[in-house]
Image (spheres, helix red, strand yellow):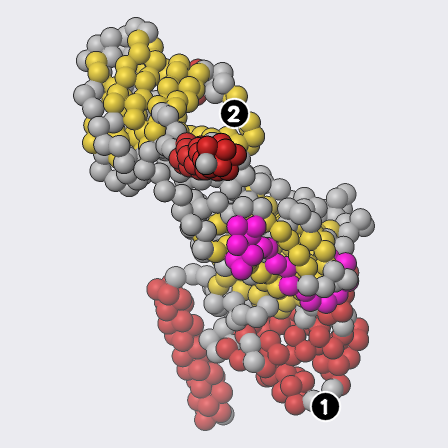
Amino acid sequence: MRKFFKKVITPLLAVTMSLSLGVVAKNGTSENLSAKAAPSSITINANDTFSPALHASNSGYPETPTAHTHTPSDKVFEAAGVYKLAANSYIMFVQNKGYWYNSSNLGFVSKVSITYSGGTSTTGKIGVYFGDSVQSTYTTTNNQTIAGRNMTDTFTNATTTYGYFQISTSNKNVQITQIVIEYDDAGVTPSVLTGLQMNKTTAEVVKGFTEQLSVTPVPSDANPGTITWTSSNQTIATVSADGLVSALVAGQTTITATSSVDPDISATCDVTVINPYVYSKVTTMSGVQFGATYTLGALGTKAMSNVVSADSVAEYDAHYTAEGNLIRENITLKFVLEPGVLANTYALKVVGTEKYLGAVSNTSNNYLRQLVDKDYLSSFTISFDTDTGDAIFSVVITQTVTKTIRYNKTYPRFSTYASGQTAVQLFVDPATQTAANEAASFANDVWNGQGANANGSCNAIYGALSSAYNRLGTDAKTIVDTSSDALYVNARARMAYLEAWDTLNPSSPLAGISKTNTTLSALAIITLLGISVIALYYFFIRKKRYN
């Protein structure tokens, strides 16, 4: 029996104890792994550089973090700043700028220590407010008096669930030289990833060009894991590991971004690859004609966008050929040239609308709007710089103020300016430069456009339309003069009527005088006509009787 215990039972007990210790050890290790991390801190000193995940921003999270060096001048407070230390980042607003530093596993703020100097007032205060969001009502520690000397004040957060804090001072000359943020990740519950949001759901990419796609996690503070990008048809377009789509041939494909956290979580973008459609650059008046489709560009990198803007025409990053011609895209704003309401002018009718690009009568506003009516503010003269080929679209606002369409680099947009800004270039769809389009544009304006609204201004309308007719090409004139199509027959009849009216009722040399003066002049003319009739009656009728 003793041998049995020694040889059998004792080894079994040893194995059992070993297994038990192993389980305890394993459970201990697991417990240690899941234990809350000890409080940590971040110290920000003047001249510290955080790279690459530090970015200047006025509010919220930046889209593209970049490197930034903190310098003492950055620490001068012009206004209260909001700092965030929750989930994965903190926001720091200094001198109306925001700096975002992306850290990992940060928790709730427990203390903030500020080292500062300067301050011109001994009654000024500096304080830290703690809250649960940027929009929340903050609780505050006791503000400390600024004594105009170097010092460090520590502010403690009594509420462990607050992850935001705000530093404020009543003296803008205070200079922050160091901020120490102590935080504790106790109670932090990571957000669960529920989806991905693509920056675009559809995209049109010109063959040979690229399109950058990106995704953001849903919710925004969740960990998206590693994103895998795929293309459903790699012969149409490929996609890189960071979401850059390269267009190969015309066709359609779907780009999918999938999270490594959960393969069922993904986002897609339907990509259409189109063959490049090139608008040719126009540098002389020979390329300007009614009925053709145009757009304006600038700098060899920008073009007019069809994104609606209230007081100007938006711009976009355009694609150009090596020869300097513009590749048209869906976003390109296009306009068709029509006769303007003034002699030798053109109206720019926006394709897909019944509106015209035009300036405003207030000379202090550099606007370029889409106007409903065709009038003098939407009637431009067109010319070209003989040296550069730049297009000059000019509109007369008043007798002393003329503005031209230019590109504003400081506030990117196309608008009208009396001087300055950047020159623009004109581009045309060559397929629309036909005699048929030119003739139809003119005839339509005569019959359905301003010619149909000539009542009360026949002389002016006839003058504008005659000017437009004289600018037609030879082939377009032939169509207008000889076509049996109803549009041209009616247009010819109306032009004949307007011409007859203009001949019988020539423009008055008194045009432009006030209504009062016009009325007085009319009375004088009527009086003279009456006297003339009486005189004729006397000399011809009475004289005949006497004879």
Q: SS of the residue at dot 1?
A: loop
Spatial separation of the CA atoms under disc 1 and disc 2? 76 Å
Point out which mark residue 484 bears. 1
Q: Residue at x 37, y 19 (%)?
A: 180
Visible in this render: residue 524? Answer: no
N-terminal of the two: label 1 or label 2?
A: 2
The amino acid beneath tag 2 is: Phe
In depth, the one of 513 and 217 nearer the eye is 217
In depth, the one of 261 and 168 nearer the eye is 261
| Residue 355 on image: x %, y % | 52, 67
* Residue most extreme to the top: 149
**Dot 1, how many residues are within 10 Å of its Cα: few (below 14), some (14-19), or many (20+)?**
few
**Dot 2, how many residues are within 10 Å of its Cα: few (below 14), some (14-19), or many (20+)?**
some
* Residue most extreme to the front: 1
Point out which mark residue 50 bears. 2
Which residue range is magenta in the image?
A: 247-265
Q: Looking at the picture, does residue 466 appear above or below residue 311?
A: below
| Residue 444 on image: x %, y % | 62, 79
| Residue 477 on image: x %, y % | 75, 76
Q: Looking at the picture, does residue 8 appear above or below residue 489?
A: above
Point out which mark residue 64 bears. none
Instruction: Answer left or right for 394 relative to 483.
Output: left
